Amino acid sequence: MVEHVKSWMKENSALVYFLIAQMIAIGAAGASALAYFTRLETRVSIMETRGAEYSVARMSRMEEKITVLEQQIKQNQESIRLYRDQYFKDRNNK
């Protein structure tokens, strides 16, 4: 019986190596999936801990920054308009 198994292993060594490699690959994929889902669960847990208050505060800070940028844009547009008007006024007076 043992001789029969040994001879079969020798005859089908490529198949045996392939099956072993396949088992290793499946194990690695399982470990990778486990690590991914663990990280995902950690992220969800953090978001649940911080809650909506954290997200709302973050959004309000972003809105404040946008408001400041919009004000700066309006000031810049007004400055450009004044420079343009002055330029054309000086040009037309010459």
Image: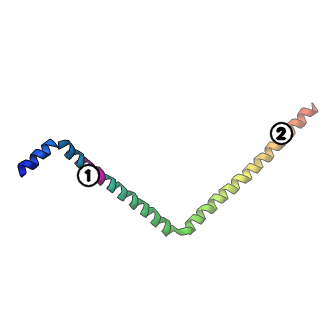
Of the residues shown, which amino acid type is indicated by label 1? Met
Query: Residue 14 appears in which quarter of the rendering?
Result: top left
Left or right: where 5 falls relative to 32: left
Question: Mark 2 and mark 1: span between their CA atoms?
Answer: 74 Å
Image location of residue 36, percent across then percent down: 39, 57
> Which of the labelled discs sits on residue 84, or is there none?
2
Image location of residue 25, percent across then percent down: 29, 50
Q: Residue furthest right?
A: 93
Report the predominant secondary structure element of the magenta stretch: helix
**In-front residue for pair 9/33:** 9
Residue of label 1:
23
For label 1, the SS is: helix
Of the residues shown, which amino acid type is indicated by label 2? Arg
Query: Residue 18 appears in which quarter of the rendering?
Result: top left
For label 2, the SS is: helix
The residue positioned 61% from the left and 61% from the top of the image is 59
Q: Residue furthest top?
A: 94
The residue positioned 13% from the left and 46% from the top of the image is 8
Give, as a single range, the part of the protein colored magenta. Answer: 20-27
The answer to whether the residue labelled 2 contacts the one labelled 1, judged by CB atoms less than 8 Å apart, is no
